[in-house]
Structures are given as structure tokens and as C-alpha cells.
Image (cartoon, grey):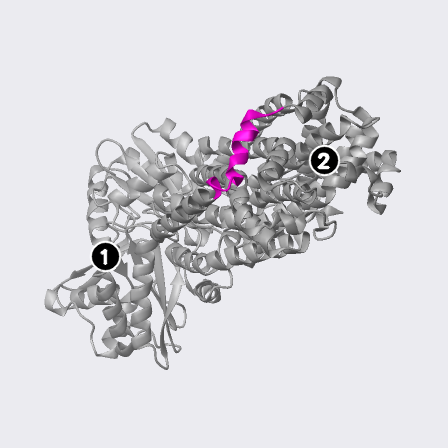
């Protein structure tokens, strides 16, 4: 230890400790400004941030967005009649009022709003004179028994059963397409962005609560992307409570660790400053908080505490033979600034690699977390030692530290056996078996969602119950895969175009996981059959162009204005990973066979198309990210320790954690998706801290000439306590998420808790065993060069 005392003070150390008041004042001013900025952070998200905008599917969807009526961001409101069916006066009146009320909610695309009360919902029938038709709700409707009977007949003739009207006639749907941005009612020249949380609250208050109270015989169910995101943001408000709980637990643990209220408050305050700075900077660069970046303040708090604990531990050790708090703080700064800096850079690398994923929310999470980690350099590596140099550490804590330095520790003595010549090979064999078993089991790991409905929310959440109601009562689910059939202008109604579409629909309807398919062919066949006295033999595509032109005139919404694009809507049972990939493979195989000049089958629009594209992006990025993180971490360890053996000792336990983490996800039935992919990178980035702190101390004792097991015992005595404490602290901080109402957050909490604890255990257990095989203590003994951290 004494070598550190004689080390010359670095330029950075002199700059900071010779200007301590300036450091405090600058940090205070920055904190005030960023606190004001942090207060203005609002929950924000958008449909486009959640999807991979550069994927070919999404680009095709955006390119043809105007031709695809209402296939993007829509909400479906199902109004259920609890007793009886929908054909009664009170029910129809409530439905009309809801339709009118929804029409005036901000962000609704009014031109596309559709329910039984929409004039565009019509019926047709074949009579002796030819076709007859009209609006489903006739102009003469007055709620009398006779007009209700007409309404029933019109619904039967409308082709809307299973789509707008439930198969059992006990509920009907209002289709609500949304605009991402819409004109400000007070200033038409200005566009406002759709606020999902506000929109979700309006649906709850103005629709669900109001009309269920007004008519007890009515139950309202709401599904759709905007509603799901609104519920997610509401669930996130609970995160503040979890943050409070994590803070209190950390406070108790820190005091138990330090026995010093002054240093406990110093560590917690500087770490809270880091969180405030991170939120303030996020707002300054124009980001809000979305469901994913809500987790970043937790991570920054946890990482900040971990570095704070190392600092306090170092200062307590130095205080035992330093004259005053300033000297102890300076020596600790000198000793721990570099390993702290390297560990923080490793954390940042874990976050930055996430930028390669082409999904807005993950990129924002990566940027937000990188900003937060950069902030920790100032708050926990610089501000904390300066603060402690003023307030000092309590006598009680210093006495305890002095006693600790000289007394024997049975627990650390026991753990030091991991470096024993007999125990080390056993540890390595166990690790290899765990690695092999983990690799074998993680073959079961799936990409994408593995549950129906909204897997981000709990299965018993109101949203998922609403979703189940719609799946069970309608033929068209909310999971729609849209294939865009592109032809030349006026080409979509030719037999050459319609025949392959018919073939595609038949193929898809016979694919497992597909409920039904609809396109202009569906309408054309119905009309041709109708024109031939309803004879089933005629329910086919005519080769006569005039007949075809006449038959598709009623297929409004199923082709665009110049008949150059016709969507095929494929309704899926769910959006589970295998359902999507099966459907997409079938369409791709079909397209490969049938695409030619003037006729192309393009994927994909609809929410299932977006999910499929997201799954592809994640599948491609998953391995790339892991490899990148490991390369970056390994390079940083190489630069720091200038030794391949040291790098292997630090990185191999992390690789084992990643493999076991994947196996755990497979076992728990958690898929790799937008929510869980960041965890894989974060677990490695944060976990490397333990190895760096342990190895840097171990190496200094090996240089002093101690044999490996004794050197490891001394390492555990000085740093082991801080590493063990840090691991528990980090894990407890994120473990509170497991109780979140939001399932993906609970999944992330569970995964991060596992990875943080296992990384800590790996550093304490596997690192010394590997050192036994890889490090040659005799080569290190007496050397002063080598590692950057030896200086």
C-alpha cells in the first residue's frame, strides 16, 4: 500500500484538489440548471420510435402509407351488450353517442372512423331487379321494433359479421384510425404530436367510465397500439415508487457497510446528483422518457452507488494511516481514479453498442445511458472524493477499518480457497459444464413475443382481457399481416392480377396460425355470385374484364385510387414469433414464385408486419451486439492491464454469465425482443466492473511478491467487501422491478438481477481459479511496469 503514498500527484489530482471550492461551486451551478431541466422531462413515445424504420418491410409500408387506409396505427373499441344482443334501442343509442364522442377526440383520423353508424358501412343484396343496397342503419331508423328488425337484416347482408359485428351479435366495434400528428384546434397551421398517455386517459374517462356508468347494460373493451402504450406509461409512473424503495434499501445497506452517516449521505447525494444530471441532459438534447428509457435512471443510480462504495471503502482504508480527510481522499483518488474510469468506460461501451440497432427507443436508451455513465465520472469519481475531503469519515468507521486491516477474516479466508491449487481446477471444470449446459439449453431461446395480446403487460391486465374478448368474439383478430399487391395503373382489377391473389389467399388460409384473409377478390367473388342469382357455382373470378370491373366497384378500401395497389389482409391468431415467421415465409416463397414485371407481392404492413420486421432486426443484431461488447471490453482490459491472461481472467466469467442468462430466458419463456435485448448488453457492461476492481488489487499484491492464494485473500480483505456489497446493492436496486405491473419491466428486472449477481459471483469465484492457470506470479513479482493501474 505504501507505494501509493509516495506516488507523485498527477496533474488531474492537483487540478481538482487544489481548487476544491471551485469544483463544488461548478457542480452546484450545473446541478441547479440541470435540476430545472429534469423537472420538465415528460413521458413521450411515438409509433415510429418503436419500429425499425430502415427495414425493407417498413420502408415499403411508409412508401405506400397513403394507399393503405387505416392499416397503421388504429384503436378498436368494442361495445358489448351484457344482456341480450345489440339489436335494442338503448344499445344502439349508446353506440351512436360513443361514435360521436370518439369523433371529437384529438388525434383521431375522422375520415376513417368506422362503426355501424358510419354512412360508409353498407349492405347489398341481389333481387329480381338486380342489386339493392343502402346504409346498414337506414335513414328511417327511429329505434322502433320494425326498424330494429330492418337493422338486423341489413347487418346480415352487410358482410360485417365477424368484423364490425361479433359472431354472436352481442357486441360491435368502432374502428378508430389515428394520426401521429394533427392540426392544433386553436391554430390550424401548427401540428401537434399525438400524446398517447392523454389519448388513453380520454378513452378511459370519456368513453369507458362515462358510458358504462350511463348504461349499466354496456361494457367497453379497447385494444390497439396507442391504448397499450398509454397503459405502459401509466404503469411507469409506479416506477417512481420503486426508485424510492431502492433508495431506502440502499441507504440502510450503505450505513450498515460504512457505519458512517456522513459518507452514506455523501455517496447517496452524489449519486442522486448523477441521476438529476442525466435526466436534465436528456431533456436538454430533446429526449423524453419512454417505457424503455425509464429504466436508465435506475441503472445510473445503481452504477453510481457501486463506484461510490469503492471510493468510500478506499478512503476508509487510507484514513487509518493518513493525517487528515484531505490526504486520505487524495490518495484514494490517485489509487482508484483509473480503475474507476476504465470500469465506467466499459459500462459506456455496453450502452453504445446498442446504437447499431435500428429502433428509436433502443437508440434513445443507449444515448441516455451513455450520458448517465459519463456524468458518473464527474459526480462519483471527482465530486465524491472532494466532498469527503471536507466532511471526512467518522472516527467509528476509521477505527473499524484499522481493526479490519490487521485482524483475520474467516469468511474471506474461506473464499480465498477459490485460488487454491486443488479447488481451482474443480471450479474450472464446473464452469465448463455450466457453459456447455447453458449453450445447449439456450438453443430453445426464441426471438420475439411468446404470448398473445400485449406481452409487455401482465396476462391479467385490463388490456389483455379486452384483447381476449375481441379474439374470442370476432373472426378478425387485431394481429393483421398486410401483403401489398402492386401492379401498373388500372392493373389491379385484371384477371392476371386477381388470380394469383386468390391463390395466395387460399395458401394463407391453409397455413397454421392464420384465421382468415380478405382482399378485393373476396368482394369480387361475392358480387359475381350475386349477379348470377346467388348460385354458388358462380362464386369465382370471371375472365370477362367488364364483369370484373363491375364486381370490384363495391370493394372500397381494398384498392387505391388508380388501382395500382391492392392490399391482402391476413388475420393471424396471435403475434407469437413462430406464427409470424411461418406466415412471412409462406408469403415470401409465394412472392418469389409469382413476382414478375407489372405484378409484385410486397411485404409488409399491418401490426404483424411491423412485428415481423422488428423480429428480423433483433435476430440480426443480437449476436453482433454481444460480440461487439465483448471485443470492446476485452480491448479495454488489454489496454489497462497489458496482458492477455488478465483480459481472459476478467472476460471469461462474463461470457459464462451471458450464456447462462440466455438459458434462463429460454427456461422462463422470455423471448429476445426490444425490451430484453438491451439487458444482454447492459449485463456485460455493468458486470465487468467487479472483475476490473478485483484484478487491479490482486495484481498489486502479486507484484509485492505474495503467492496467489495469499494475494487473493488480501484482495478480498481490501476490495472483496466492496464488490460483494456492490453486487447486492445493484441487484436489490433492479430487483424491485420484478413487482412492476409492466411485465417487460419485471422481465428486465429479473434478468438484470440474475446477471448482476452472477457476474459478481463469477468475479469472486472463477477469476482466481483462472488466475491459477493463466497468471504467472513469479513474472509479476518485483515488476513495476506492466499495468496502467500500477502507476
Between 61 and 544, the residue placed more toward the observer is: 61
Measured as percent of width and height from the top left, residue 88 is found at 25, 36
Please say if 738 is above or below 449: above
Is residue 419 located in the magenta-colored stretch of the structure? yes
> Which disc, if any, is residue 45?
none
Q: Which residues are magenta?
A: 408-424
Task: Report which residue position mark 2 lands on.
Answer: 35
Between 443 and 403, the residue placed more toward the observer is: 403
Q: Is residue 782 visible?
A: yes
Q: Residue furthest top?
A: 396
Left/right of residue 391 with respect to residue 55 in the rendered view: right
Residue 411 image-quadrant placement? top right
Q: Earlier in the sequence, mark 2 or mark 1?
A: 2
Measured as percent of width and height from the top left, residue 567 is found at 35, 65
Between 677 and 37, the residue placed more toward the observer is: 677
Please say if 393 is above or below 790: above
Q: Is residue 286 visible?
A: no
Measured as percent of width and height from the top left, residue 577 is found at 35, 53
Task: Report which residue position mark 1 lands on.
Answer: 512
Measured as percent of width and height from the top left, residue 634 is found at 59, 55
Label 1 crowd (10 A; few <14 / some 14-19 / many >=20): few
Number of marks: 2
Between 275 and 515, the residue placed more toward the observer is: 275
Give SS at disc 1.
loop
Give SS at disc 2.
helix
Q: Main secondary structure of the magenta part?
A: helix
Q: CA distance from mark 2 to mark 1?
A: 54 Å
> At 21% across and 53% down in the image, what residue appears?
157
> At 35% across and 39% down in the image, what residue appears?
464
Amino acid at each position: 500500500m505504501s507505494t501509493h503514498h509516495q506516488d507523485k500527484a498527477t496533474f488531474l489530482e492537483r487540478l481538482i484538489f487544489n481548487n476544491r471550492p471551485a469544483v463544488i461551486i461548478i457542480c452546484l451551478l450545473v446541478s441547479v440548471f440541470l435540476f430545472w431541466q429534469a423537472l420538465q422531462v415528460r413521458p413521450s413515445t411515438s409509433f415510429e420510435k418503436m419500429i425499425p424504420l430502415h427495414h425493407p418491410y417498413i420502408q415499403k409500408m411508409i412508401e405506400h402509407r397513403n394507399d393503405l387506409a387505416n392499416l397503421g396505427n388504429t384503436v378498436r373499441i368494442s361495445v358489448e351488450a351484457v344482456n341480450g344482443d345489440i339489436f335494442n334501442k338503448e344499445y344502439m343509442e349508446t353506440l351512436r353517442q360513443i361514435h360521436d364522442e370518439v369523433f371529437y377526440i384529438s388525434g383521431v383520423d375522422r375520415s376513417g372512423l368506422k362503426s355501424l353508424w358510419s354512412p360508409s358501412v353498407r349492405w347489398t343484396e341481389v333481387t329480381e331487379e338486380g342489386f339493392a343496397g343502402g346504409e346498414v342503419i337506414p335513414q328511417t331508423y327511429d329505434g322502433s321494433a320494425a326498424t330494429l328488425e330492418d337493422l338486423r337484416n341489413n347487418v346480415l347482408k352487410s358482410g360485417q359479421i365477424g368484423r364490425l359485428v361479433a359472431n354472436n351479435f352481442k357486441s360491435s366495434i368502432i374502428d378508430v384510425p389515428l394520426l401521429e400528428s394533427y392540426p392544433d384546434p386553436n391554430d390550424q397551421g401548427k401540428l401537434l404530436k399525438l400524446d398517447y398517455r392523454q389519448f388513453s386517459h380520454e378513452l378511459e374517462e370519456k368513453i369507458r367510465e362515462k358510458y358504462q356508468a350511463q348504461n349499466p347494460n354496456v361494457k367497453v373493451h379497447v385494444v390497439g397500439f396507442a391504448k397499450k402504450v398509454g397503459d405502459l406509461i401509466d404503469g411507469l409512473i409506479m416506477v417512481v415508487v420503486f426508485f424510492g424503495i431502492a433508495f431506502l434499501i440502499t441507504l440502510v445497506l450503505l450505513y450498515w457497510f460504512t457505519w458512517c452517516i456522513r459518507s452514506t449521505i455523501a455517496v447517496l447525494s452524489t449519486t442522486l446528483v448523477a441521476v438529476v444530471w442525466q435526466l436534465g441532459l436528456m431533456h436538454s438534447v430533446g429526449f423524453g422518457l419512454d417505457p424503455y428509457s425509464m429504466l436508465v435512471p435506475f441503472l445510473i443510480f445503481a452504477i453510481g452507488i457501486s463506484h461510490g462504495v469503492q471510493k468510500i471503502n478506499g478512503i476508509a482504508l487510507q484514513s487509518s494511516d493518513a493525517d487528515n480527510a484531505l490526504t486520505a481522499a487524495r490518495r484514494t483518488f490517485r489509487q482508484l481514479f483509473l480503475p474507476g474510469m476504465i470500469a465506467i468506460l466499459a459500462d459506456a461501451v455496453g450502452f453504445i453498442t446498442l446504437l447499431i440497432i435500428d429502433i428509436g427507443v433502443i437508440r434513445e436508451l443507449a444515448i441516455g445511458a451513455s450520458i448517465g455513465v459519463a456524468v458518473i465520472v464527474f459526480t462519483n469519481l471527482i465530486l465524491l472524493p472532494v466532498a469527503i475531503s471536507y466532511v471526512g469519515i467518522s472516527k467509528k468507521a476509521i477505527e473499524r477499518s484499522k481493526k479490519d486491516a490487521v485482524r483475520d477474516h474467516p469468511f474471506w479466508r474461506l473464499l480465498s480457497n477459490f485460488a487454491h491449487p486443488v479447488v481451482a481446477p474443480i471450479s474450472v471444470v464446473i464452469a465448463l459444464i455450466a457453459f456447455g449446459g447453458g449453450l445447449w439449453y439456450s438453443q430453445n431461446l426464441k426471438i420475439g413475443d411468446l404470448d398473445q395480446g400485449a406481452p409487455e403487460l401482465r396476462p391479467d391486465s385490463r388490456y389483455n382481457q379486452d384483447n381476449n374478448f375481441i379474439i374470442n368474439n370476432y373472426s378478425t383478430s387485431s394481429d393483421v399481416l398486410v401483403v401489398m399487391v402492386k401492379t401498373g395503373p388500372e392493373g389491379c382489377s385484371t384477371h392476371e392480377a386477381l388470380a394469383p391473389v386468390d391463390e395466395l389467399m387460399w395458401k394463407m388460409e391453409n397455413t397454421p396460425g392464420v384465421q382468415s384473409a380478405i382482399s378485393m377478390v373476396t368482394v369480387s367473388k361475392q358480387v359475381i355470385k350475386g349477379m348470377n342469382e346467388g348460385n354458388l357455382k358462380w362464386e369465382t373470378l370471371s375472365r370477362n374484364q367488364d364483369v370484373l370491373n363491375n364486381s370490384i366497384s363495391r370493394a372500397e378500401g381494398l384498392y387505391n385510387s388508380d388501382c395500382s395497389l391492392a392490399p391482402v389482409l391476413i388475420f393471424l391468431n396471435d403475434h407469437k414469433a413462430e406464427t409470424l415467421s411461418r406466415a412471412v415465409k409462406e408469403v415470401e416463397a409465394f412472392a418469389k414464385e409469382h413476382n414478375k414485371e407489372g405484378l409484385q407481392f410486397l411485404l409488409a404492413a399491418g401490426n404483424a408486419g411491423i412485428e415481423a420486421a422488428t423480429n428480423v432486426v433483433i435476430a440480426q443484431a443480437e449476436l453482433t451486439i454481444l460480440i461487439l461488447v465483448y471485443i470492446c471490453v476485452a480491448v479495454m482490459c488489454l489496454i489497462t492491464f497489458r496482458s492477455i491472461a488478465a483480459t481472459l481472467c476478467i472476460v471469461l466469467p462474463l461470457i459464462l454469465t451471458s450464456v447462462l442468462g440466455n438459458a434462463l430466458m429460454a427456461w422462463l419463456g422470455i423471448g429476445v425482443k426490444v425490451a430484453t435485448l438491451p439487458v444482454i448488453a447492459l449485463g456485460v457492461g455493468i458486470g465487468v466492473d467487479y472483475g476490473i476492481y478485483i484484478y487491479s488489487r490482486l495484481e498489486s499484491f502479486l507484484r509485492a511478491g505474495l503467492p496467489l492464494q495469499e494475494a487473493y485473500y488480501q484482495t478480498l480483505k481490501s476490495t472483496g467487501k466492496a464488490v460483494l456489497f456492490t453486487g447486492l446493492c445493484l441487484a436489490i436496486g433492479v430487483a424491485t422491478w420484478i413487482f412492476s405491473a409492466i411485465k417487460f419491466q419485471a422481465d428486465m428486472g429479473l434478468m438484470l438481477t440474475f446477471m448482476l449477481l452472477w457476474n459478481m459471483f463469477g468475479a469472486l469465484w472463477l477469476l482466481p481459479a483462472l488466475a491459477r492457470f493463466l497468471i504467472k506470479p513469479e513474472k509479476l513479482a518485483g515488476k513495476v511496469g506492466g499495468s496502467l493501474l500500477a502507476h
